Image: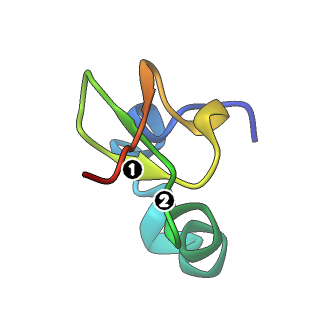
């Protein structure tokens, strides 16, 4: 899948692919500064930024 989470969320992709979405979203390391979604790999996000613990 080469689409970003921002785009596939609008297509009901998550509803039809819950297992794959779980793998993308578990233990997030990055978030999108555009849509605030989080993912374990920055390739799923439009404008990724690394999550930093304080």
Q: Is residue 10 above or below residue 16?
A: above
Furthest toward the right, the residue is 1
- Mark number displayed over residue 53: none
Q: Secondary structure at mark 1?
A: strand
Q: Could you tell me which residue is drawn at 56 percent across and 67 percent down?
A: 21
Where is 19 relative to 32, above or below?
below
Q: Nearer the viewer, residue 23 or 53?
A: 53
Name the foreground residue: 1 vs 51: 51
Mark 1 nearby-residue class (10 Å; few <14, some 14–19, many ≥20): many
Please give the residue where the numbered disc 2 appears in the rendered image.
Answer: 28
| Quarter of the image where the N terminus is located | top right
Say the numbered circle drawn on residue 38.
1
| SS class, disc 2 | loop
Q: Residue furthest front?
A: 54
Q: Earlier in the sequence, mark 1 or mark 2?
A: 2
Q: Quadrant of residue 23?
A: bottom right
> Depth check: 25 or 12 in front?
25
Q: Is residue 11 left or right of residue 40?
A: left
Residue visible at 52% across and 70% down in the picture: 27
Asked whether disc 1 touches disc 2, contact meaning CB atoms under 8 Å apart, the reply is: yes
- Near mark 2 (Cα within 10 A), the count class, few <14, some 14-19 or many ≥20, is some
């Amino acid at each position: 899948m080469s689409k970003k989470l921002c785009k596939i969320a609008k297509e009901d992709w998550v509803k039809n692919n819950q297992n794959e979405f779980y793998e993308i979203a578990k233990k997030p390391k990055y978030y999108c500064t555009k849509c605030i979604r989080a993912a374990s790999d920055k390739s799923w996000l439009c404008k990724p930024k690394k999550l930093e613990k304080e």
